[in-house]
Amino acid sequence: MIYERKRTVRYAETGIAGKLKPVSIFNYFQDIASEHTAELGVSAWDLLPKGLAWVVFRYQLEIHKYPLWNDRLIIRTWRYPCQKLYELRVYEIYDDQKNLMIEAKSSWILTNLNTKKPVRIDRRLPADLLTDHQVKIDNNLIALDPIGSIDATRMFQIRMHELDFNRHVNNSVYAIWALESVPPDILTSFRPKRIILNYIGESLYGDRILSNTQQLNSAPFPVFLHSLGSERSQKEITRIQTIWESGES
């Protein structure tokens, strides 16, 4: 039940010091999850004609060591259905010596594209995907509290190339908006160590997203809370926590 692929870090996927960019990590995980669900017959492509779509609810990413340009990686993922209502998915990235470099976990609900409401997965997925023979995943995903104050604000315009297969903003874009909202001295001296995302609502093409950021009193490394809101709906759409470490790590 564990799906595995090998890949080499491409130059376009790296940033400062030739290290794999966080957005590339999210894209790696999106690619392998899409390939896995396609093999199972429940990918976005398979579900669209049925008026259904997978929607991510929570996501946690932990980076132990950043891969570099030309590194050879092993990427793994597996899924686990929970209470017939949603499913969890784990991702792992290893180097070619099988040392764990990055790990992540996410939760997903199945939604009706017309009503925008969740549906029960036990009524929509094949029966063999609902049994307990999959590798179990514990649901320890963190629910973030609202930010308490605003130390910085940035505005982002949703562009067409940021939309996914279902015309929703790609889930990795929300992480980019949060990371780009921290002070420049943090961006140049530190790297994200952990990213926690709580997805609350959706945003649409052309909308403007207000990213409010609060810096917490933390030592030895910076911690930020982020609240992303839609200017059009005046509603919060995502809460994010980013934890940073020295750029030399």
Image (tube, rainbow, N blue to C red):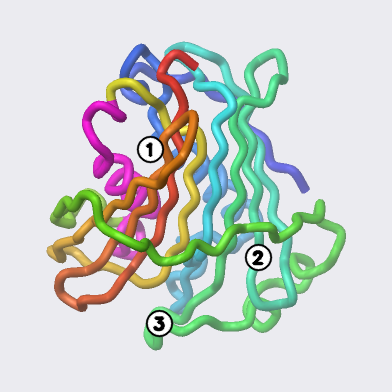
Q: CA distance from mark 3 to mark 2?
A: 18 Å
N-terminal-most mark, 3 or 1: 1
Q: Residue at x 37, y 85 (%)?
A: 114
Q: CA distance from mark 2 to mark 1?
A: 23 Å
What's the amino acid at mark 1?
Val
Secondary element under disc 1, as helix, strand or loop, is: helix
Q: Is residue 137 above or below residue 242?
A: below
Q: CA distance from mark 3 to mark 1?
A: 26 Å
Instruction: Look at mark 3 in the image and give the residue it sits on.
Output: 116
N-terminal-most mark, 2 or 1: 1
Taking the view exactly as shown, the residue that stands out farthest to the right is 133
Bin the neighbour count of mark 2 within 10 Å (Cα to Cα): few under 14, some 14-19, many 20 and up.
Answer: many
Query: Can you tell which mark lies on residue 23?
Result: 1
78 on left or right of 190: right
Give the magenta part as a residue range. Answer: 164-187
Which of the pair 230/187 is nearer the observer?
187
Q: Pointers 3 and 1 in contact (CB under 8 A)? A: no
Which of the pair 20/32 is nearer the observer?
20
Instruction: Look at mark 2 in the image and give the residue it sits on.
Output: 87
Report which quarter residue 138 is drawn in. bottom right
What's the amino acid at mark 3?
Lys
Q: Is 144 in the magenta?
A: no
153 on left or right of 128: left
N-terminal-most mark, 3 or 2: 2
- Image spot of residue 65 (x, y percent): 56, 22
